[in-house]
Image (tube, helix red, strand yellow):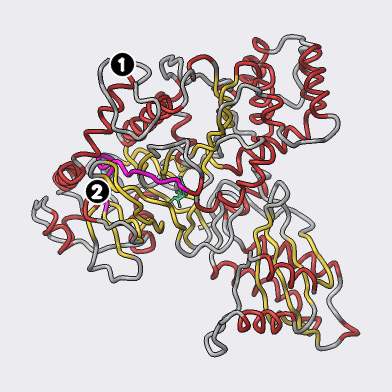
Amino acid sequence: MAVESTLPTPFRTPASDKDAKALQFIEEMTKNVDSVQERVLREILSRNAETEYLKRFILNGATDRETFKSRIPVVTYEDIQPEIQRIANGDKSPIFSAHPISEFLTSSGTSAGERKLMPTIHEELDRRQLLYSLLMPVMNLYVPGLDKGKGLYFLFVKAETKTPGGLLARPVLTSYYNSDHFKTRPYDPFNVYTSPNEAILCVDSFQSMYAQMLCGLIMRNEVLRVGAVFASGLLRAIHFLQNNWKQLAHDIATGTLNPKITDAPVRECMRKILKPNPELAQFVTMECYEENWECIIKRIWPRTKYLDVIVTGAMAQYIPTLEYYSGGLPMACTMYASSECYFGLNLNPMCKPSEVTYTIMPNMAYFEFLPHGSSTSCLVDLADVEVGKEYELILTTYAGLCRYRVGDILRVTGFHNAAPQFRFIRRKNVLLSIESDKTDEAELQNAIENASLLLKEFNTSVVEYTSYADTKQIPGHYVIYWELLVKDSANAPTDDVLNRCCLQMEESLNSVYRQSRVADNSIGPLEIRVVENGTFEELMDYAISRGASINQYKVPRCVSFTPIMELLNSRVVSKHFSPDLPHWTPERRR
Ligand code: AMP
């Protein structure tokens, strides 16, 4: 087909008619950003005109931007939480959306320690599917031949719950993988996975990972790309291989499945895939038994052309480790999305991680941008953002979120046609993150206060603290540096008490953290490192020597700068780890 893409790429010919249509769609959307945005807002406001929320602000059926901007306030989750709670409790009246709320998507962002509940409507699945359908056509422009093999993707579902009113509450990807859009997707030679649906849909994370890794090994010569949603997920898979290769090789050699895999659908589908293959088992053993993991991805899956993982934002910390395991394979960050809305895609997916930009698709929602540090009266439209400036993303969705602050800070780096391209800068107020957990300063402070109650009977207090997300080992873990004031050295807190302080901190952290610890095993035990008295004063001296003002100096509550880490680590007097798992169940505490 004679459609030429304007995408800056060495391979400009679409791989198929289907791809040509998808690329054409991207072109149309990116050329007509402003008119598409105007239409999207009009559609949202007219269909939701009779909702309780819009009526409250007396829009009187207006669907233009000016009226919308002058009447509707910019809000955070906490502002709309009472309405969300009513929906969760079973109120079926049109509060935010004229369309019935089909389920809640549980964000990894938390409010009062629990995942945020994002109401969604059924048709949003189509919008998400649409964005997914654009990814391969773009990738095919850069990497030819992806129809000649398979993708080894480690994809997982998480536990689901029901709200008091009976609506399902689950993460957006769990919702998507359980949808017919995913489960009964038509065959597409460019999008064939090694993982069977049964393995992806198994809620037990060990069994799911085991089956997916086994399939990946069995089909190793067909694998052309290896991925997971986030970099942390792919590293978990490598770690899993490190811990389980003997059993995996045994299963391959004998054609029998590990008895720990008890999920009936997984056993049934693996029965068809797993056949005795002593040669492959020997290969896996040869590659793994020396415990040399450098380049392991390339060695086991030699045809891999790239890794498909998000390494932007909090995931950038994993780039060096992934480079080590993959032997420097390119890392493609293909999309930018959230529970509230899928935003956009990377039109140059084979670029370096530091150069990744996302182009927001104007048909997904109505987007506004709050210049970083400005008041909420200065919002700009998608078509009007300026190159070089940083903005907070504000969203109005078909499901009824109105002028909602997502909390992401983005910088405009350029344009594709009329569509701005954004670099993900950071999530507001996130201090510590290992995978999807997002711990803010207030949560950390609260956890420290709760833990330090255990020190009271020892007449000891925490005088200063800071933290560090240690991702050098898999799984990563939180490290908290404590400087203690021990008033009676004859009665200093024991090792056991300090270990329990670690657990107490974990109990105080949000449910996403605790779920990662308990259900997913993707975060290791929290560690407290007690440092010598005077260490934090030295830290201040160091900051001042580098130009900080004495009057304005504040102890950083999270550190990663190497000289500071070296200083702290050289003053450690004892290390303590959480001796147990914190409590977590899928049910919400509030
Ligand atoms: P959740 O609501 O749990 O799905 O998390 C969505 C959040 O994950 C977004 O608001 C971002 O902060 C982050 N995120 C999603 N995609 C990306 C990406 N491609 N790069 C960096 N951060 C991302």
The boundaries of the magenta stretch are: 355-367
User: Is 356 within the magenta?
Assistant: yes
Image coordinates of residue 292 in percent, x first then y, are 80, 35
**Quick check: 96 left or right of 505?**
left
Q: Position of residue 83 (x, y in %)?
A: 32, 56
| Type of amino acid at the residue the image marks with label 1 | Asp
The residue at the point 73 percent across, 61 percent down is 503
Question: What residue lies at 82% left-to-right and 17% top-to-bottom?
Answer: 282
- Residue type at mark 2: give it: Tyr
* Rendered-image quadrant of the N terminus: top left
Q: Quadrant of residue 286?
A: top right
- Residue at image mark 1: 17
Q: Secondary structure at mark 1?
A: helix
Q: How many marks?
A: 2
Instruction: Indicate left or right for 391 with 94 as reference.
Output: right
Residue name at image x 25 percent, y 17 percent: 2
Q: Which mark is residue 366?
A: 2
